[in-house]
Amino acid sequence: MSLRLYSQPLVITDSGGKDSLVCRELARRAGIPYEVQHNLTTADAPQTIYYVRDTFRKLEEQGIQCTVNKPVYKGMPVTMWTLIPQKKFPPTRGQRYCCQILKENHCKNRFITTGVRWAESVKRKNSRGVFENFTSDISRRTILNNDNAEERLLFESCTIKGKRICNPIIDWSNANVWDYISSEHLEANPLYGMGFFRVGCLGCPLAGKIRWTEFRMFPTYERAYQRAFEKMLEGIHAEGRQTKWKTAADVFSWWMEEETIEGQICLSDLEQWQSDNE
Ligand code: SF4
């Protein structure tokens, strides 16, 4: 479909996680032409960066085109740490501007795969399908079912321009993914061996309380967020605007959904972390 509709190979988007790993392997086994792209979030763990770099080197030796997309905002290079002061509020579950700018700004007019799976999210289960026609207008979004041949043909003859998405492992469970990785002896991101269940930006607001563990293991990232919050507050104050936050630590505490009162710390997360790691 990618070759027919776009005259270009399928793009396997690779976050460095286990689902991308399976998608890469499926594409390889399918024997189709494909290329691989990784969107640099600038907030991934060093293990992910090295893993992606190493994977891409091996793929390029096999003649597969690999690209690392660096994020750009308003025409300028950007990182998570320079984006937060520009946006003047931290990324949250409801305001994931970072994903939009750091992760989803590429692959326009291409047919891509993602490792999205229903098992990962109830919301995704209700809103995503095996094939998607990507448009910001949800009412115009086309979601087709892979096992309905009639609809699939209709989709293939569609001439709408824009990004299209294939989610080849949308109905795989976590166990399916790990069974496949294990049975095919695929090399996964070393973060999984360090106790991580998900691989992505450290401090992602979607990760909830796990962020405390992430920051204990990668304290420089906590400092980077704190510095970004500091610069954010400087920008807000320079504009003469009021905020409820006095310091970067206040922003960090709010952002981490800490429920302790000002001036106190809570040891329950430490206990939770210890019991998780026993
Ligand atoms: S922090 Fe989370 S929401 Fe933001 S870019 Fe990373 S994965 Fe997306």
Image (tube, grey):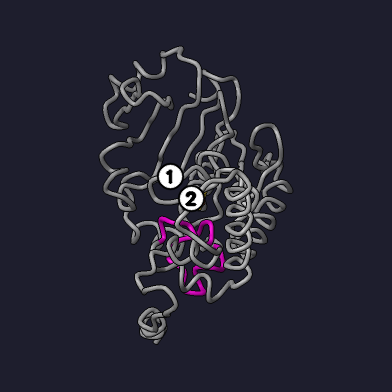
Image mark for residue 165:
none
Asked if residue 191 shows in the view, the reply is yes
Circle 2 residue: 91
Q: CA distance from mark 2 to mark 1?
A: 6 Å
- Give the amino acid type for the residue marked by disc 1 in the picture: Gln
Q: Are marks 2 and 1 in contact (CB under 8 Å)?
A: yes
Give above or below for 143 relative to 228: above
- The residue depicted at 32 percent of the width and 32 percent of the height is 146
Give above or below for 169 relative to 47: above
Image mark for residue 95:
1
Q: Secondary structure at mark 1?
A: loop
Magenta region, residue range: 189-207
User: Is residue 3 a member of the stretch shown in magenta?
Assistant: no
- Give the amino acid type for the residue marked by disc 2 in the picture: Pro
Give above or below for 26 relative to 10: below
The percent coordinates of residue 111 (x first, y second) are 51, 28
Asked if residue 40 shows in the view, the reply is no
Q: Quadrant of residue 144?
A: top left
